[in-house]
C-alpha cells in the first residue's frame, strides 16, 4: 500500500470488482478485503461502512465514462458525441486503465452490473439516490454541453440541448439495463442505432 489517496483508490476498485462478483445484497466487507488481498479491517481505516465505500466508488464509475478532458474545446461535435456514447456502452480497456489500477477483465459486463446494482439500491436508499442523481446530472450535462457546442458551431439545428440530452441518456440507461437483466442480444447496438438517428435528426444537412 502507498499513499492514502492511492490506497483509497485501490479499495474502491476492489469494491468494484467484488460487487460485480457478488451483487449488492451478498457483498460483504470480507469479500472486498479478499479482492484487495488485505485484511478487511484495513477498509475501516478509510471508509466508515460498506455503503460509504460504495458511494465513494461511484466516482470511479464516473471517471470511466467522463473523460478528464471533457472541458476541452470541441470541434467535431458529432464525433465527440459518438465517442461518448460508445464509451458508455462499450468502455474501452485503454480508457479504463487510465482511471483504474486493476480493472475487471470484462469491463463492459462489469460496468453494466455495477450500474444496475447501485441504481437499483438507490430505489431504497436516499444517500445512494442523491449520489446517482449527481452522476446522472454530470452525464446529462456532458451531453448537453456537446449539443450546445454543436448548435454554436452550426453543426446542429437549434434544438433544446437539455431535452435532447435527456433523450440520449434515457436510451443509454435502458440499453445498459436491458443488456444486464435480459437475454436480449444486441440491445446496446440498437441503442447506438437510435442515437445515430437523433444525431442525424438534429444535424444540419451537409
Image (tube, rainbow, N blue to C red):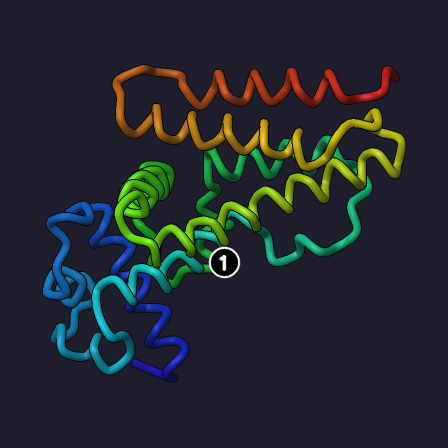
Residue 176, placed above or below residue 16? above
What residue is shown at x 56% (from left), y 34% (from top)?
A: 85
Residue density around tag 1, few if under 14, some if 14–19, many if 20 or more, within 10 Å? few
Question: Quarter of the image containing the C terminus?
Answer: top right
Could you say which quadrant of the image residue 102 lies in? bottom left
Could you say which quadrant of the image residue 45 lies in? bottom left
Dot 1 lies on which element? helix
Image location of residue 196, percent across then percent down? 63, 20
Question: Quarter of the image containing the N terminus?
Answer: bottom left
Residue 128 left/right relative to 192: left
What residue is shown at x 54% (from left), y 22% (from top)?
A: 192
Residue 52 left/right relative to 21: right
Residue 195 left/right relative to 18: right
Which residue lies under the disc numbered 1?
98
The reply to whether residue 105 is visible in this rendering is: no
Image location of residue 29, percent across then percent down? 14, 65
Could you say which quadrant of the image residue 2 lies in? bottom left
What residue is shown at x 71% (from left), y 56% (from top)?
A: 71
Residue 173 left/right relative to 8: right
What residue is shown at x 42% (from left), y 25% (from top)?
A: 175
Front-most of residues 74 and 120: 120
Image location of residue 151, percent across then percent down? 84, 34
The reply to whether residue 125 is visible in this rendering is: yes
Amino acid at each position: 500500500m502507498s499513499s492514502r489517496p492511492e490506497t483509497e483508490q485501490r479499495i474502491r476498485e476492489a469494491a468494484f470488482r467484488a460487487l460485480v462478483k457478488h451483487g449488492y445484497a451478498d457483498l460483504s466487507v470480507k469479500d472486498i478485503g479478499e479482492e484487495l488481498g488485505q485484511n478487511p479491517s484495513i477498509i475501516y481505516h478509510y471508509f466508515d461502512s460498506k455503503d460509504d465505500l460504495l458511494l465513494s466508488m461511484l466516482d470511479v464509475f464516473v471517471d470511466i465514462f467522463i473523460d478528464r478532458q471533457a472541458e476541452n474545446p470541441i470541434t467535431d461535435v458529432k464525433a465527440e458525441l459518438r465517442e461518448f456514447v460508445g464509451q458508455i456502452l462499450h468502455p474501452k480497456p485503454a480508457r479504463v486503465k487510465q482511471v483504474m489500477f486493476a480493472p475487471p477483465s470484462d469491463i463492459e459486463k462489469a460496468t453494466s452490473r455495477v450500474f444496475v446494482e447501485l441504481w437499483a439500491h438507490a430505489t431504497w436508499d436516499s444517500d445512494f439516490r442523491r449520489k446517482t442523481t449527481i452522476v446522472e446530472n454530470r452525464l446529462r450535462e456532458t451531453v448537453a454541453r456537446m449539443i450546445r457546442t454543436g448548435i454554436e458551431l452550426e453543426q446542429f439545428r437549434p434544438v433544446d440541448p437539455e431535452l435532447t440530452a435527456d433523450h440520449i441518456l434515457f436510451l443509454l440507461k435502458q440499453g445498459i439495463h436491458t443488456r444486464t437483466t435480459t437475454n436480449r442480444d444486441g440491445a446496446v447496438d440498437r441503442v447506438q442505432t437510435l442515437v445515430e438517428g437523433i444525431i442525424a435528426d438534429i444535424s444540419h444537412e451537409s
